[in-house]
Amino acid sequence: MKSFLPLNWGLPGGSRIAAGKVFGTAEPGARLRMFQVYRFDPDNTGGPRLDTYYVNRDDCGPMVLDALIKIKNEIDPTLTFRRSCREGICGSCAMSIDGRNWLACTQPIDDIPGAVRIFPLNHFPVVKDLVVDLNHALAQHRLIEPWLKTETPAPEKERLQTPEDHAKLDGYYECILCFCCTGGCPSYWWNGDRYLGPAVLLQAYRWLIDSRDEATGERLDRLEDPFRLFRCHTIMNCTKTCPKKLQPAKAIAMTKAMLVERQH
Amino acid sequence: MSISRTPLARARGLGSAKSGTADFWRQRVTSVLGLPLIAGAILVIVSNIGADYRSAIECLRRPAVAILLLLTILNFCVHMRIGMQIIIEDYIHNETAKALLLIANTGFVAAAGVAGALALVKIAAVG
Amino acid sequence: MTDNRERAMDRPRSPDLQVYRPTLTMTMSIAHRTTGAALYLGMVLFVWWLVAAAAGPAAYAVEQRFMRSLPGLIILFGFTWAALHHTLGGVRHLIWDTGLAHDYPWREYLARATLFGSLSLTGILWIIGYLT
């Protein structure tokens, strides 16, 4: 099964996806891969559509991002997407590829059977084509105050942390804020206006367990909310769709455990 | 979504309720306590499938059975109420409809719990 | 600025469940919610049984006639599976709540165990119930 719902099922009028243009044909002989890409042009009156491109795999790099760049350079210069580092560290090219969210630059084309279907990160407002509006998610990130908070005057040199205490941050500090997890979270789909989502909650946990931070209780106060934190129902999509192999669901579970701990 | 508010204002919304842990913990307490209770209750229900009136009453009025089923009902009424509240909050975004459904949820659970408990007490006391 | 903000209101939403490839844990999460809601309604049946028994032989006979009919038996069978599935799903959630078994492949094993466990336990229970 490709998905639980058919393509346009339940989508509001302005979000429904029409059949789009087809660029080129599947000529026999060449090792062609079909790419179906979500398109939306805010400067035109039309709604979203799904365009089809054929890319010669023998003349293209191995990753989905290589194919997108090739399409933009050689077939359709209007195709719009974010990308920067092309090595999985900047988080710009996060998108829905073959039914899960991943970085286009670390997703091998050959790992995907059949047509490669590409959409913007799930449920976000679309600015243009594969570019989504992350303003709300980034404001939620701002809300958790993701920086070291201390009252004790700074020491002459740096604030010390033992290797053991630093090791506790392993698996949490590596988040690149690509929002693959948040885009893949059903709780965020239904209640993203109030629920902070896995990416922001993982970041929040990273500051909760930093041995140098002096605002742990204040941070917990800010999170302790039926919607901000407790909308997480451990569906696990976040952990499975993290291109950095981090575990937001575990970070959230441990945050809930900290709240229980301070209550009892 | 109001366009006159900044993203940060919308993200902060009405602020943190500073609650939710109690319900989360209560849901876990009732699920752990529910494990032996549901096992016992299933045994009682299965052993009474097809039982005639007299033997069902004989079974239900035994103190061990009455206590087990009473605890089962009370435990799961608490569990059910929280569970359904979470479902309502997840999907219902109209504030009026949400309030009415949350009230109905509490009413339903209270009615089911009291009816079941009263029936058990009556059987245990009168037969 | 006003232009941009007005445009922001009209932006389409990118699809979610319409394109997300189903995962086992997501499916088990949906099943956990569905069985939970079904058990919520199923509480009516359990209470009906107790109230009927408390009310006397006539009321009890009505309840028994329904529960022994085909719809009644199907509901009871579904109720058994829902109860066992939700119970095992609850155990899975308790394990995850402690931070354990979030890694691959353990999270998948847990999700599979919920499904196979509930199906086989329901089968065993009904075979025993049928034989005795």
Image (tube, helix red, strand yellow):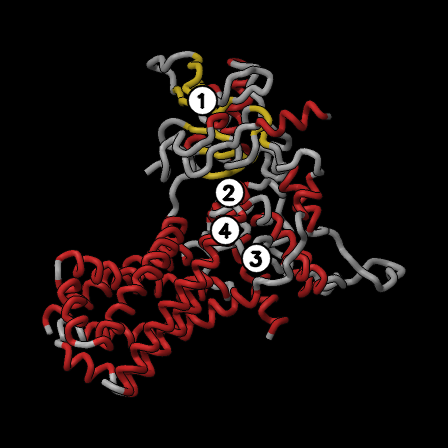
What chain letter is assigned to the residue under label 2? A
State which mark lies toward you, 1 or 2.
Answer: 2
| A223 w.r.t. A60: above or below | below
Residue labelled with disc 1: A50
Residue labelled with disc 4: B98
State left or right for residue B28 relative to residue A43: left
Q: Secondary structure at mark 1?
A: strand
- Kindly report the distance in space between the C-alpha atoms of the residues bearing marks 3 and 1: 38 Å
Residue labelled with disc 2: A189
Q: Are marks 3 and 4 in contact (CB under 8 Å)?
A: no
Q: Position of residue C123 (x, y in %)?
A: 19, 63
Circle 4: is it few (<14), some (14-19), or many (20+) Cα within 10 Å?
Answer: some
Q: Quadrant of the C terminus of chain C?
A: bottom left
Circle 3: residue type: Pro
Circle 2: residue type: Trp
Q: Can residue B36 be seen at all in this image of the molecule?
A: no
Q: Give the mark nearer the N terminus: 2 vs 3.
A: 2
